Image (spheres, grey):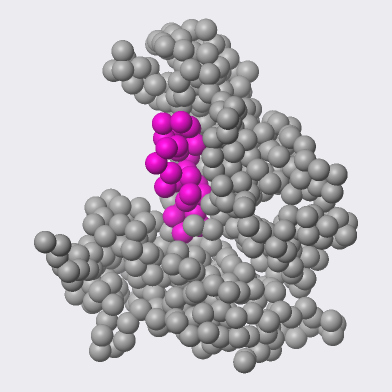
């Protein structure tokens, strides 16, 4: 399959890339890992006139924790960079858990974390983790940078809040207050498939008490489901059978699944409840072991 | 210099964008004029006539078109040739020769890791990339690393055995440290 014809530029600086987007008034697309965009243009779901390849711009492949404790992930960090990180499992267990489940190992060598967020697929894995973690996107345009809350970044299926002349240059995960706990569970029919249903949970634990609680779902709605309000029933509580059941019920109620070839709506809602329960039980068990 | 312009079906319009790229393919520097929409897999197969790289699903699912770009496995149906400008690409043709097989190729022969052979080049390159990072993988790690490559013949069992065979051979071939 061939995409329709497009022009191609591979600028060496962000300023040049932004100028190219600006000059092409909405007919240009940013190309990073290409693992979503290239299939889209091959299927001609998208037919941009210009692709601005940012892979040759130096200094965008960092992943670091800044002085304030924010995790900052540059636009050219590949999925496998997160997967192979030795520090991420302790600092950001939710991201670490999802890093093995995005697409397949070969796609993960090319596809980028930030690009995946921009793609805004309702079944995308990273968007769920970022909404659960309260993350933000840094957009850079001709007038400088602005930060966009992940909950406002995804406007709908395959639609993000970037202006036509902005590039998502960085993702920010705010600091954990206390100890980070959480995970990401995904039911997929086979490796590389999109989620039948998946659950991201991110908790800040103060000893045995839940400080902040975040949750988001993929595959069970027309967009990534923000279940942060639902899981907030855990805030200030300890994790026990009663509180876990209440949280799992609330999150499952926030899901908005549809019956399709991957399963019935009831089945998907049941998976959500099971996954929330499983993640919270695992956190409770590891808290007990640590105590 | 070869032009890949003509492998793209001719369409109306004279102002077709073309870019000159230089790619190191299996150790040899190749310079070509390509249309930006040319996929890496077609550059290799039609342009350079390296037909060992197979185009299977064309939808980033099957991994038959896997090649190494700067040492990392990539599905060449999901990368434009222009994105490989200045990079090193390795295909199955660069792995070994008929008389001197790469240990991974030898493993696939010894352990019957193929039947029809269509997925094999991609399987072998993904395996090579795994063994370069992890010379002593467990069976689970091999299955995990190859989970982006589909085989409809073997049931994977002999493919996994082949990779483990190659890993052992490569470890034994390494000079032993005192």
Rendered location of residue A270, percent (x, y): 48, 27
Rendered location of residue A105, percent (x, y): 44, 55
Rendered location of residue B98, percent (x, y): 29, 88
Residue located 28% across and 51% down the image: B140
- Overall secondary structure of the magenta section: helix
User: Which quadrant of the structure image shows residue B8?
Assistant: bottom right
User: In the rendered view, does A179 fall on the left or right side of B85?
Assistant: left
Tell me where the magenta segment starts and ends, as one range: A79-108
Residue located 58% across and 42% down the image: A73
User: In the rendered view, does A18 fall on the left or right side of A190?
Assistant: right
Residue A25 belongs to the span the image colors magenta:
no
Residue located 54% across and 35% down the image: A65
User: In the rendered view, does B23 fall on the left or right side of A206?
Assistant: right
User: Do we see residue B165 in this rendering?
Assistant: no
User: In the rendered view, does B15 fall on the left or right side of A98?
Assistant: right
User: Do we see residue A91 in this rendering?
Assistant: yes
Give A28 or A70, whichever is nearer the viewer: A70
Give A220 or B53, whichever is nearer the viewer: B53
Give A260 or A81, whichever is nearer the viewer: A81
Q: Where is B118 relative to A86, above or below?
A: below
Q: Where is A240 relative to A195, above or below?
A: above
Number of numbered discs present? 0
Q: Quadrant of the N terminus of chain A?
A: bottom right
Residue located 49% across and 57% down the image: A109
């Amino acid at each position: 399959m061939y995409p329709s014809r497009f022009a191609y530029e591979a600028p060496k600086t962000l300023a040049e890339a932004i100028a190219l987007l600006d000059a092409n008034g909405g007919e240009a697309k940013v190309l990073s890992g290409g693992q979503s965009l290239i299939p889209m243009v091959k299927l001609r779901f998208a037919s941009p006139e210009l692709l601005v390849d940012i892979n040759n711009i130096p200094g965008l492949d960092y992943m670091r924790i800044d002085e304030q404790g924010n995790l900052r992930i540059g636009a050219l960090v590949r999925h496998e960079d997160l997967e192979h990180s030795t520090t991420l499992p302790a600092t950001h267990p939710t991201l670490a858990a999802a890093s093995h489940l995005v697409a397949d190992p070969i796609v993960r060598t090319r596809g980028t974390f930030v690009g995946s967020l921009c793609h805004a697929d309702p079944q995308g894995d990273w968007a769920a983790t970022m909404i659960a973690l309260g993350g933000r996107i840094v957009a850079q345009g001709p007038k400088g940078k602005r930060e966009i809350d992940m909950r406002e970044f995804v406007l709908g299926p395959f639609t993000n809040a970037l202006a036509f002349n902005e590039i998502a240059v960085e993702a920010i995960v705010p600091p954990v207050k206390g100890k980070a706990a959480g995970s990401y569970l995904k039911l997929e029919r086979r490796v590389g498939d999109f989620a039948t249903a998946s659950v991201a949970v991110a908790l800040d634990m103060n000893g045995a008490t839940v400080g902040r609680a975040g949750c988001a779902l993929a595959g069970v709605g027309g967009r990534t489901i923000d279940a942060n309000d639902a899981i907030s029933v855990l805030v200030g509580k300890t994790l026990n059978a009663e509180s876990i059941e209440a949280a799992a019920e609330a999150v499952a109620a926030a899901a908005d699944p549809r019956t399709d070839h991957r399963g019935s709506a009831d089945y998907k809602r049941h998976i959500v409840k099971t996954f929330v329960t499983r993640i919270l039980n695992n956190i409770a068990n590891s808290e007990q072991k640590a105590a | 210099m070869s032009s890949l312009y003509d492998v793209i079906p001719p369409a109306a319009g004279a102002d077709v964008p073309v870019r000159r790229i230089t790619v190191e393919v299996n150790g040899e520097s190749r310079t070509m004029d390509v249309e930006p929409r040319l996929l890496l897999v077609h550059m290799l197969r039609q342009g350079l006539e390296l037909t060992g790289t197979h185009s299977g699903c064309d939808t980033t699912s099957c991994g038959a078109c896997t090649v190494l770009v700067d040492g990392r496995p990539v599905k060449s149906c999901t990368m434009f040739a222009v994105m490989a400008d200045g990079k090193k690409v390795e295909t199955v043709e660069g792995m070994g020769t008929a008389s001197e097989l790469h240990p991974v190729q030898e493993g696939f022969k010894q352990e019957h890791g193929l039947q029809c052979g269509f997925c094999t080049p991609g399987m072998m390159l993904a395996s090579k990339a795994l063994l370069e990072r992890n010379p002593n993988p467990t069976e689970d790690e091999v299955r995990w690393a190859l989970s982006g490559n589909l085989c409809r013949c073997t049931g994977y069992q002999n493919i996994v055995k082949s990779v483990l065979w190659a890993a052992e051979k490569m470890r034994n071939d390494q000079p032993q440290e005192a």
